[in-house]
Structures are given as structure tokens and as C-alpha cells.
Amino acid sequence: MSDSKPIIWMRPEKPARGPAPTHSRGQIAAVAIDIADSEGIAAASVRAIAKRLGTGAMTLYRYLPTKEDLYTVMIDEATGFEPQEPTGDLRADLTTLAHRRRRIFLRHPWLAPLLATRPIMGPNFMRGMERDLAVLTGCGLGMDDTVAVLNLLHSWISGAVQAELTERATADQSGVDRHAWRLRMEPYLTSLLATGEFPHLSRMVQTSEIGEADERFENGLAIILDGIEARFSTVTEKNGSRRPISGTGGGPPSTRRAIVQRGARSSTTE
Amino acid sequence: MSDSKPIIWMRPEKPARGPAPTHSRGQIAAVAIDIADSEGIAAASVRAIAKRLGTGAMTLYRYLPTKEDLYTVMIDEATGFEPQEPTGDLRADLTTLAHRRRRIFLRHPWLAPLLATRPIMGPNFMRGMERDLAVLTGCGLGMDDTVAVLNLLHSWISGAVQAELTERATADQSGVDRHAWRLRMEPYLTSLLATGEFPHLSRMVQTSEIGEADERFENGLAIILDGIEARFSTVTEKNGSRRPISGTGGGPPSTRRAIVQRGARSSTTE
DNA sequence: CCCTGACCGAGTACGGCGTACGCGGTTTGA
DNA sequence: TCAAACCGCGTACGCCGTACTCGGTCAGGG
């Protein structure tokens, strides 16, 4: 009763005794990804996937015990794995890493939301994390700093690309609907701004150009990399020493405090 | 047929001629928020909300035409509005802003995912944006820079807090289940690390202390603020000039290019 | 004044979802 | 050879959002 199932990645693909399975987890996940990419994650229902495979809905449960397991495999399959050898240039390597992740999120618009709301430990994902750790430590960062930098970058990319995808989905609306959407939204916005309570917002709408998503990503990435480099630059003209993450940055020293405790392992190795 | 509904915020709360409504959008949203906070957003079904209100399910559709409209009102209600007067210290003001947003996201674990996946234009949200714009411009930033900084910060906060919430939800699992989860996960992780293909990952698990969520947030925030301050610091000992966002940062000039085009409005005002 | 139309509350019902259960057929190790 | 293990999958249950409908209620115009 409490033993349930031993995690999807531990279940063997091939059975020991019965007839050979007609399908496979990877095949099912591929079909689900295809549907989710084109029609949205909500359209990737068990029945819809089964119909595409020309089989019964309940058949899929022989391969994936729950819908959550399907998501798990979809995420790992869509994440894929692309190698990256460290060049030693922290900024260049982080840029490569960030662009790859954004590209994958854009290719699968459902991926970022799913990835952000559950713990991921699929083999592809683990390989990717191992690669990222290798790249960062290859740039001379310690393990704690590596983890901190990766967390920071991944969090931002997830949030930024989700915003980009939401904007894209809103802008899509299939042409004609887009016009209808504007028609419904405009009077509300106009009435809001007409109250005079939003002077800055009005000025923003009138004077600020939003810019392309690519540019905004590059822009944000540059700022974040500046912040990271300020602490971890390996090649610096000033001096060769690297400042630990807990050190002071560019602001007044009084407002700073140590953040990450390093070498703070307890006495026993357990 | 194509006129449908004129956006939820434009529909009047009080009817012109009929009997007075028993409930209100705000009341319904409050109940929904209460359920979502304690039992998850999926538990905030129309029937469940109606049951709590002691009314029929279809009654709610007199107030909120679709579930999506319910989400819209929930988001705006949960976002709330808290004033903030600019101090002129960019770093301090951004820190205040970031902490407020994180606090709200943590109070309503369903908020960040919902907010990230749809365009938000509710009155509370608009007031908050107006306040943020006022704070940033009050620090001396131009409108384009203000928008860029806010986007960057909000994207990171969304991603970071979602990761924190996912970790918290995984760790919760109600005590006993937590043990069962570890029991199911451990053999898989052990077998993965035992392959020897994940040396850095193994080292991370063994040597790196993850640290508290509060510390990690403060840590990431400090790095991002460093990056922002490097471009926009209003109070600098070196010199008083601020560099625009499109200027060169800390890297080699050859790899940089202008990012935000300013004053690029087309000729006609239409 | 009353009556007419606008609005309210809510029951019924429909199509879709994830999935528990069970049955008949197929394969294979002992 | 034969029972255990496994496959494909039809049926059915309890959720979900919500379209449709109907009787009751209130307010403004005659």
C-alpha cells in the first residue's frame, strides 16, 4: 500500500516475461511533446495522445503510471542534452549556457512553467546539470559559488522567458482575435489612464519603446553577468584575485554583509 | 457574437435594475484565495467556492463570466497594494521593492505561476506598477532604464521564488510522506551517482551546503543589484555621471552593442 | 398604481478530464 | 506444459468548467 511505485526512472522499459510492448515511454513522450508544442500543454491529454498513437487511452498507463510521470518524461525528453566544453572565460560560457536554455524554453513553450513547479531529476536534466557544474568550476569557481551563480541565472532565465512567452501568446491570438483583444482592452486602459492617477504609466506608454525580446534578453543578461563578473571574474586587468561571493561588491561597505557561509560544514563528515 | 464580454474590470458591480446581488466579486475572490492558499489552486474549483459561500455553483457565473476571470480577480486581490515612497537610494528602494514582492509570492504560493503565464492589468497591479515607476524614476533613472530594471528584477524574483516554493512544496509532503518520498528517490539518485558519470554533481551533494532560502534570495539580489548599480548608481564616489543602459559595461567593448533604442517613436502620433 | 423588463439564484445536463478495475489474449521461465 | 507475468483496452466513476433554462424579485416608466 505504501510501497506504491519506485519512481519512473527506475522502472525497466522492457518487461521480463510478457509480450513485447507496442510502444515506449520515449515515443509517447515525443507525441505528447508534439501536441503540447503546437496546441498547448492542456491539449496533451491522455486520450488525445492515445488517439494519435492509434491505441486506447488506458494503454498508456502501462507505460506511465500517472499524468505526472508523463510530464516528468516530457520534461526530460524536451530538455535533451547538448554538450558544452568550458573555455575558461566565465562570461562567454555563461552566455552560451543562457542562450541554450532560452532556446529550449522557446522551442517548447510549456516547458518553463512545468519545469519551474516541480523537482526535476531526469537523466537528461542531470547530465545537463553535471555539464553546467563542469563549465562553471572550469572557470575557477568554487562549488558554493558555482551553485549560487547557476541558481541565479536559471531563476532569471525562467522568469524572463516565461514573460516573453506570455507576451508572445497574448500577441498571437491568431490575427483577427488579436484585433478583438485590443478592442476589448483599449477602452479599459484608456479609462484607467484618463483618471490621472497613473502619470508615470501614461508616460511609459507614450514614450517608452519596449523593444524586441531578443534585445531585452541580451540586455538583462549583460546586467546580470556584470553583477556576477564583479565578484567572480577570472581574468581581470586590475589583479588576479577573485572575490568570494560573500565579499563586498560595488556599494558602500556598511550596507553589505556576508551572505554565503563557506567551509561551514559541521565537524563530522556525515 | 463577436462582442462577447467587455473585460471583467469594465463590468459594473451593481446592477441597474434587478434585485441587489447577494455576493460580490471581491468576496468570491477572497474565498477562492483562502482555499488556494491552504489547499492549492486546483482546489479552488467553482463548486468548492460555491459550497463555502453556501450557494449554488452556477450563481458564481453571475459575478465572474469565466474561470479565467476569477483568476484575474484573485491575482489582483492577492497582489493588493502597498505604498512606497522613494528615498532616492536606488539600491535601498530596489531592495524594498524586491522584498515586498517576494513576501506576497510566499504568502500566496499559487500567485507567481498564475501571474507569470498571463497578462495582468488589474487596478491593484496597475497601481503597483505606477508606484514602482515612480520609485525608479525618483532615483534618477530614465523611463527606458526604469522599465528595463523593473523587468529584470521582476523576472528574477518570479523565477527565484517559484524555485523556492517548489522546494518548499516538495519538502512539505506532510512529514510522513516526506520520508516515503526520500525512500523512493534515494535509490535512483544513488544509482545515478554510482555510475561515475556525475563527478561534479557528487561533489556538490557531498560538499555544498544549500543554505536557507532567505540567504539565497539575499545573495542573488545582491549580485543583481551590483549589476544594476554598476550602470545606474546615482550616488557614486568616482563621479556623478550615470551610464545609460545601452552603454558599455564591464566587458571588452568589442562584444557590446547598443541595446535599447531611445526616442524611436514613429513620426505620426497615431 | 401596476406592469414590464432586467436581473438574481440555482438546478440540470453535457462534454472532457485523469484513472481504478477487470477481462481476454500473449509470451516465457521453470 | 502450464502458470505467472505482462499487454491492450473497454467500461465506469468522480471530478471539472460551464451552457441552458426557469421561476422569483426588484425598479422605472406608463
Image: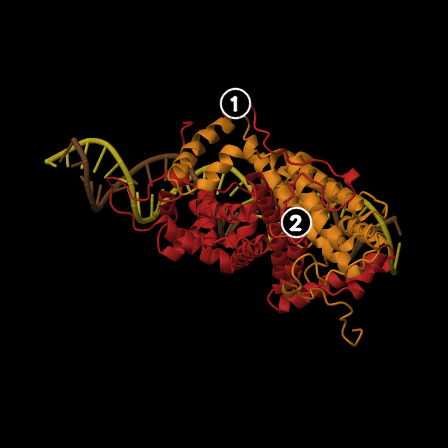
Chain colours: A red, B orange, C brown, D yellow
Q: Is residue A237 above or below residue B222?
A: below
Q: Are marks 1 and 2 on the same chain?
A: yes
Label 1, label 2: how far apart the Cα atoms are: 37 Å
Q: Is residue B109 left or right of residue A186?
A: left
Mark 2 is on which residue type? Answer: Asn
Q: Is residue B70 left or right of residue B206?
A: right
In-front residue for pair C9/A89: A89
SS at mark 1? loop
Marks 1 and 2: which is nearer the front? 2
Disc number for residue A239: 2
Which residue in the protein does label 1 denote?
A268
Report whether residue B8 is seen: no
Q: State the residue at coordinates (39%, 57%).
A: A52
Residue D13, image x, y percentages? 45, 37
Q: State the residue at coordinates (76%, 53%).
A: B9
In-front residue for pair B37/D8: B37
| The furthest residue to the bottom | B267
Q: Is residue A108 left or right of residue B5?
A: left
Q: Is residue B224 left or right of residue A235?
A: right
Residue A50, image x, y percentages? 39, 52
